[in-house]
Image (cartoon, helix red, strand yellow):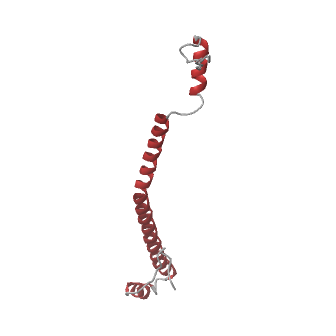
Amino acid sequence: MILRTRHTLPSPHRLPPAVAAASRAQASAAGFTLAEVLFSMAIFAFAVLILVGSLPNGLASMQSARARSAEVRILHHVTSVYQSELDRATAQSLPTVLQQLSREATLYFDAAGDPVR
């Protein structure tokens, strides 16, 4: 005759309360739940989406600032040329200098606003 016995592992319901609480605390400290991982991935995806969405605005602002900087450099160069010519002029040569400055001249500048010679 063969005796059959069932051996089962004790469930948390059959353990003393202190042991069951320690067992649950140890199990929950072992890792993250699926909900926690999904929630953190959603937050990360949202942050990346915001960063990627703001790139075009940042690039447009940078291009606008670069163009404005070139305009300022060009204006600074032209006014310094006029100012230096006027500073060198004497009372007798002032009409001639003003006539030369009033003539149309073509000046060339690169994309950064620096004069090209």
Q: Is residue 27 left or right of residue 100?
A: right
Q: Position of residue 64 (x, y in %)?
A: 41, 65
The extreme front residue here reads: 1
Vertical position of residue 60 compared to residue 13: above or below: below
How many numbered marks does the figure carry?
Answer: 0
Judge by depth and name the residue closer to the eye, 54 or 40: 40
Q: Is residue 69 left or right of residue 22?
A: left
Could you say which quadrant of the image residue 15 lies in? top right
The N terminus: image quadrant:
top right
Judge by depth and name the residue closer to the eye, 77 or 24: 24
Q: Position of residue 29 (x, y in %)?
A: 59, 28
Judge by depth and name the residue closer to the eye, 1 or 78: 1
Judge by depth and name the residue closer to the eye, 93 or 53: 53
Q: Residue at x 52, y 81 (%)?
A: 88
Q: Is residue 65 left or right of residue 5?
A: left
Q: Position of residue 97 (x, y in %)?
A: 44, 86
Vertical position of residue 6 compared to residue 115: above or below: above
Vertical position of residue 96 compared to residue 110: above or below: below
Q: Residue at x 46, y 39 (%)?
A: 38
Q: Residue at x 58, y 16 (%)?
A: 20
Q: Position of residue 112 (x, y in %)?
A: 49, 73
Vertical position of residue 83 compared to residue 18: above or below: below
